Image (spheres, coloured by chain):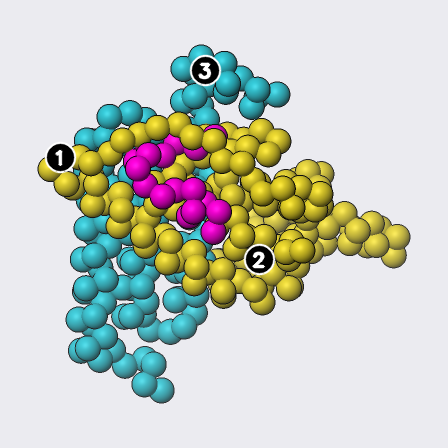
Amino acid sequence: MGMTVITPLLYWLSWIFLLLSAGFFIAGTVGMLRFPDIYSRLHAVTKADTLGLGLLVIGLSLRADDLYSVGIMILIWLLVMGSGATACQLLARYGRESEGDTEADDVAS
Amino acid sequence: MTRLIAAAHRSGFLAWFICLCLLWAMLSAGQGWYLGLPTAFGASVLAAALRLPAPRPGTLLRLPRFMVFFLRTLWHGGWDVARRALSPNLPIAPAWEKYQLQDHYRDHPLYPRLRLLLSAMVGLLPGTLSTHYDEHTLTLHVLDERQDWRVTTLNLEQELARLLEMEP
């Protein structure tokens, strides 16, 4: 099968995705350092890092040996995305509650 | 024994347990069941106790369409926030907003799940982040109030409703 042969084209294509991925991780980190408050920072970390990990998975899939490892990587990405989205929401909610916002109080009930 | 299995099926426990065992089998290449089985069992008991609707095969069939939509918005979301973070003048205008869910899903039994998924996933869309929700309203933090965040959120709500077969 041609599947197992890593052609030079796929190899270079994968580099493009890996570099793009690194770019988004860096942008997410820069956002976390530059944005003014906890909520804006969460925007940066959640979105940029989820996309960065997705691009990393694509890049690594292009040089994977078999479809099984591609499936595993996609699965891991989905799980990280799910836990990331949930954790982000919980942190944001915690932020609201610890600010003593009255509106946020009815969530706890 | 038959009655026990029937009860497990009704509560959704069985469907969760099978799905989670499959997930473990894939992730661990079929190893470490001494850890995987109790974890899958515990998670399934929890899912049944919380009355989470069991995963349905039909959802899997509609998943590709949803994923295309979702990956597209995820790309926009990541690109948008990366651009703002790296831009020298930091073009953001954070604000708190309310998003009202659409009326016609309210009576559907899957409405709580729609609300939960929307609240969790809206954080991956361009410029929105949900902090909490009450009965029909999400409280959102938007990164730039001049952005058209309401349309994006509405689109996600409709796509989720289609995924969960809630369309009237």
Q: Which residue is label 2 attached to?
A: B163
Q: Determine which of the numbered discs, if any, sits on residue A93 in the image.
A: none
Question: With B165 as the anchor, is B3 left or right in this view?
Answer: right
Q: Residue at x 43, y 59 (%)?
A: B69
Q: Amino acid at mark 1?
A: Asn
| Displayed quadrant of residue B130 | top left
In the displayed structure, B77 sits above or below A18; it is: above
Using the rendered image, report if marks 1 and 2 lie on a common chain: yes
Q: Nearer the viewer, residue B114 or A38?
A: B114
The quadrant of the rendering that contains the C terminus of chain A is: top right
Q: Chain of mark 1?
A: B
Q: Chain of mark 3?
A: A
Question: With A18 as the anchor, is B71 left or right in this view?
Answer: right
Q: Residue at x 56, y 23 (%)?
A: A107
Q: Does the magenta segment cover residue A26?
A: no
Q: Amino acid at mark 2?
A: Leu
Q: CA distance from mark 3 to mark 2?
A: 35 Å
Kindly indicate which chain is depicted in yellow in the rendered structure.
Answer: B
Kindly indicate which chain is depicted in cyan in the rendered structure.
Answer: A
Q: CA distance from mark 1 to mark 2?
A: 40 Å
Q: CA distance from mark 1 to mark 3?
A: 30 Å
Q: Nearer the viewer, residue A90 or B133?
A: B133
Q: Which residue is label 3 attached to?
A: A101
Q: Position of residue B7 (x, y in %)?
A: 82, 49
Magenta-highlighted residues: B139-155
In the displayed structure, B60 sits above or below A32; it is: below
Q: Amino acid at mark 3?
A: Asp
Number of other residues with Cα within 10 Å of mark 2, as a class: few under 14, some 14 to 19, many 20 or more: many
Q: Position of residue A73 (x, y in %)?
A: 39, 60
